Every structure is written in C-alpha cells, then in structure tokens.
Image (tube, grey):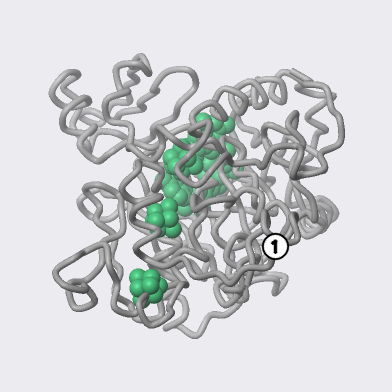
C-alpha cells in the first residue's frame, strides 16, 4: 500500500504507520479534530474518544510497557487507525484523488465542486426546524424515501442538552436531529449503532473533519468504512466549542441558562434565541468573546468547505431561510435534480441570485487554510509543484 505522494513519485512503499505514528504526528501535535475515524476503523475496539480533550485514547489493555502511545496490535501489523485519519500526512491529497481523481487547485480554497445553489425545503414542517433552508433534513428524508439510504448518522441533543451522535431512520428522528449545534458531535461514532441495527446504506452528516474520513480510508486501502456510507452531507464549518461555553460564557457572563436557549447561529457573531418565562428573547455575543472555548483541533483545521462530501451545506446567504448547497459529486447533483423535479425543494443558482455568498465562502475558506501548519511534522498538506504536476492557475479571490 502506498500513499498519494509515493504513488505520484513512483515510490511504492508498504503502509506501515500505526498508532504510535498517529499519536506523534496527529494526536499530540494539535492536529487531531476528534472526528473518531480512527476509533470506528480500529478492528480491536481499543480506542475511545476522550471528550474533554477531543482526542482518541488507547485502552490500557493494548498498551506496550505502560506506554499509551504504543499499541500491541500495531506491533503485529495493524495500521487501520492511520489509514482512516483525515489529518494524517497527505490526507487532503489522498481524499481529493479518491473523490475527484485530481488534487484541488490552489485557487479552489473551498475544495473541488461542480455547482452551488441556494435551496429552500418545500415542506413547512422541515423548513421550520432546519437551521437554514432545511435542505439537510429534506435531503436525508428524500434519500431514505427513494432507497438511496436506509439510515443517517446525525446529531441529537440529550436530556442534559449535550450534543450526541445518533442514528435516524424516520422523519420524526430526522426532525428531532435538525438544526445546528455548535458543540462537537462525532456522528461517525453512531456507525456502530447503525450496524447493530442492520443498516448498511447510510448517510453521514458532519463537518469536513468527519466527511473526509471516508475517501481518505478508501484511498489508503481501508474501504470497509466507506462501503457502509452511501451519501455524505458536509456542513461548512469554522469552529466548534467545548461544552464549557454554556456555563462559563453564556451563564456566568450573560446570565443565560442552557435550557433557555432554543437556537444558536453564527453570523459574524453568536446569535442566541431564547425562551424565558414563556417569552421569546434574543441575544448577540461578539464571536471574539467565545474564542477561548474553541476546541483545539479547530484551531488547526484548514477545511471550511467540508471539501470531501457529496454536498456541503452552509448558511452564509443574504436572505435567511435558504441553505447554500455546494454540489461536489454526480450523486449530489442527481439527488438535488430529483428533489426539484418532485417539488421537495426550490432551487436558485447561487452565482446569479446571491454571488456574495460564494465570495464569502471563498474568503472564509481562504482564511481557514492559513490554520494548517505550513509544514506539519510529516510535511506540507500539498506536495510542492515539482512533485505534483499542478496546472498553472491564478487566484480567483
Ligand atoms: C458546528 C457547525 C458549524 C457550522 N458553521 C458554519 C459556518 O461557519 N458557516 C456556514 O455557512 N454554515 C455553517 N454551518 C452549517 C449550517 O449551520 C447548517 O447546518 C447548514 O446550512 C444546513 O442547514 P439546513 O437547514 O439545510 O440543515 P438542517 O435541516 O438543519 O440539518 C442539519 C443537520 O446537521 C446535523 N448537525 C447539527 N449539529 C451538528 C453538529 N454539531 N455536528 C454534526 N452534525 C450536526 C443535524 O443532525 C442535521 O441532520 C455549521 C454547522 C455546524 C453544525
Ligand atoms: S494499531 Fe490497530 S488496534 Fe492499535 S489503535 Fe490502531 S487500529 Fe487500533
Ligand atoms: S483526527 Fe480523527 S482519525 Fe485522526 S487521530 Fe484524531 S480522532 Fe483519530
Ligand atoms: S473547524 Fe469544524 S471542520 Fe474543522 S475540526 Fe473544527 S469542527 Fe471539524
């Protein structure tokens, strides 16, 4: 097995990187996002997500000589965790080649895509619960109804109002999961529940750090994960916060308790919709005040556009009530065309109706690219042009 850089340079090397490489190059260097790709890929089930630090931890049953960074199964040749990690070495290049057959050009800051639309879900019930235009929920329900998928890995809120991953197979469940939470939900972790339920054609909804797992793993010879996922729905994303933000910022500084918050959005500032003593209320908080609660992996994350999904969805639109849909694959196109034909959605061409949304997406994506260390421990995220034959391009923004 080779990685993309060695394929490009013609060096065929066996893939030998295991947990010790993952810890030294990703987990302990601040690149880890907590996406849990390594955890669901691990065949011995010896990795668990530490939700305080949003990093995987090795069960002590697998330690070698009391070393939590040394896996006994790795010593015997297991390498699945590094194969599935979308922050390990040339992950972006691997995923680009797997999905699109080429690397993104440098001007494609939000990733490779075919078209972008503004979309409103027709169903009032769905539009009302959706974060923006309700496309995320409508798309999953349509794909279920048409037999493209038999379930979806989504995010719910538990009784203590914490964001948790889960499986949805009905409209009621999709509606319960609709809307955006700005604390992290490793939806990939719901894969095991879905498998236990006998589901085999799933949609994965998640931010870019999660949707990149599948093409990366497939490219590196671990296709088992992607075989169960028939559709990926990405969410544009610049950060998620640690749970402590509710108590330490909202409650202590603004006197807002968690159960009073009915919806949160980020539009240049934190917007909080509240219900207090039965009355609606609204609060805005400058985004810079929330900075200290940004999860560490997000500080190094270069992918605003959820660049490795069939469709990536965002709310950076001029008119509320619409979702920006960035269509990256033929499957994404096919589903939207069928939904429009069947009157499930109203579609506008983003470049005509709201060109500023695309400008803003590129601007935010370009800024976010700067977060990736110019040269991580294992090298740059893109090989230099001398290795990779990139076409000459000009920057578009
Ligand atoms: C953490 C986060 C940050 C975001 N940041 C931006 C941004 O900076 N700019 C931008 O334009 N758009 C951003 N988005 C996307 C935006 O908020 C909407 O999710 C998107 O526009 C789709 O809206 P919708 O009405 O079509 O989807 P909906 O119909 O509301 O469906 C949304 C889907 O997302 C899932 N979901 C909700 N919260 C989470 C979570 N925390 N983790 C994983 N899955 C979740 C739900 O389960 C649901 O299936 C972000 C989303 C999230 C979750
Ligand atoms: S080397 Fe294998 S067993 Fe060990 S953590 Fe990685 S995937 Fe799991
Ligand atoms: S980025 Fe994801 S796959 Fe990589 S080490 Fe962290 S949790 Fe595991
Ligand atoms: S910024 Fe968003 S996509 Fe990036 S690691 Fe954080 S949650 Fe994931």
Q: Position of residue 111 (x, y in %)?
A: 69, 40
Total numbered labels placed on residues in the image: 1
Compared across the picture, whether 179 is left or right of 105 comes to left
The image quadrant where one finds the N terminus is: bottom right
Ligand 2 neighbours mark 1 (CB distance < 8 Å): no
Q: Residue furthest front?
A: 11
Q: Relative to the observer, which residue lies in front, 204 or 26? A: 26
Compared across the picture, whether 26 is left or right of 332 comes to left
Q: Helix, strand or loop at disc 1?
A: loop
Q: Position of residue 122 (x, y in %)?
A: 69, 46
Compared to 254, does 17 lie above or below?
below
Q: Relative to the observer, which residue lies in front, 27 or 396? A: 27
Q: Is residue 155 visible?
A: no
Label 1 Cα neighbours within 10 Å, binned few <14 / some 14-19 / many ≥20: few
Q: Where on the picture, by quarter, is residue 357?
A: top right
The image quadrant where one finds the C terminus is: top right
Residue drawn at 68 percent across, 64 percent down = 143
Residue drawn at 58 percent across, 52 percent down = 91
Q: Which residue is mark 1?
A: 11
Q: Is residue 105 visible?
A: yes
Q: Relative to the observer, which residue lies in front, 138 or 250? A: 250
For ligand 2, which image quadrant applies? bottom left
Q: Relative to the observer, which residue lies in front, 127 or 227? A: 227
Compared across the picture, whether 336 is left or right of 199 comes to right
Residue drawn at 24 percent across, 56 percent down = 50
Compared across the picture, whether 67 is left or right of 297 comes to left
Compared to 100, does 389 lie above or below?
above
Q: Position of residue 352 (x, y in %)?
A: 85, 24
Q: Position of residue 93 (x, y in %)?
A: 66, 50
């Amino acid at each position: 097995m080779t990685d993309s850089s060695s394929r490009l340079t013609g060096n065929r090397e066996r893939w030998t990187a295991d947990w010790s490489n993952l810890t030294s190059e990703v987990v302990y260097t601040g690149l880890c996002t907590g996406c849990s790709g390594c955890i669901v890929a691990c065949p011995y089930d010896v990795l668990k997500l530490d939700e305080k630090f949003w990093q995987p931890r090795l069960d002590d049953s697998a330690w070698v000589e009391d070393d939590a960074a040394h896996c006994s199964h790795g010593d015997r040749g297991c390498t699945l965790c590094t194969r599935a990690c979308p922050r390990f070495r040339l992950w972006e290049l691997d995923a680009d080649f797997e999905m699109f057959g080429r690397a993104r050009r440098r001007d494609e800051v939000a990733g490779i895509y075919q078209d972008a639309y503004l979309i409103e879900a027709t169903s009032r019930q769905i539009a009302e619960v959706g974060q923006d235009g309700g496309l995320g929920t409508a798309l999953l329900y349509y794909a279920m109804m048409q037999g493209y998928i038999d379930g979806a890995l989504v995010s719910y809120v538990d009784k203590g109002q914490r964001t948790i991953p889960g499986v949805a197979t009905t409209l009621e469940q999709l509606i319960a999961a609709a809307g955006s939470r700005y604390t992290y939900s490793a939806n990939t972790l719901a894969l095991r529940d879905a498998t236990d339920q006998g589901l085999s054609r799933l949609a994965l909804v998640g931010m870019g750090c999660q949707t990149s797992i599948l093409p990366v793993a497939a490219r590196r010879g671990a296709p088992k994960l992607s075989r169960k996922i028939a559709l990926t729905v990405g969410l544009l994303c610049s950060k998620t916060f640690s749970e402590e933000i509710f108590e330490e910022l909202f409650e202590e500084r603004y006197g807002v308790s968690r159960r009073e918050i009915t919806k949160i959005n980020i539009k240049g500032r934190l917007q909080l919709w509240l219900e207090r003593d039965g009355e609606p209320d609204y609060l805005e908080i400058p985004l810079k005040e929330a900075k200290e609660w940004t999860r560490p992996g997000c500080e190094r994350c270069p992918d605003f556009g959820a660049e490795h999904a069939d469709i990536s969805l965002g709310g950076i639109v001029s008119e509320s009530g619409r979702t920006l849909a960035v269509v990256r694959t033929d499957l994404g196109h096919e589903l939207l065309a069928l939904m429009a034909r069947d009157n499930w959605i109203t579609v506008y061409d983003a470049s005509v109706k709201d060109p500023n949304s695309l400008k803003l997406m590129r601007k935010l994506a370009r800024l976010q690219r700067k977060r990736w260390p110019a040269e991580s421990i294992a090298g740059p995220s893109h090989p230099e042009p001398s290795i990779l034959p990139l076409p000459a391009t000009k920057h578009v923004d």
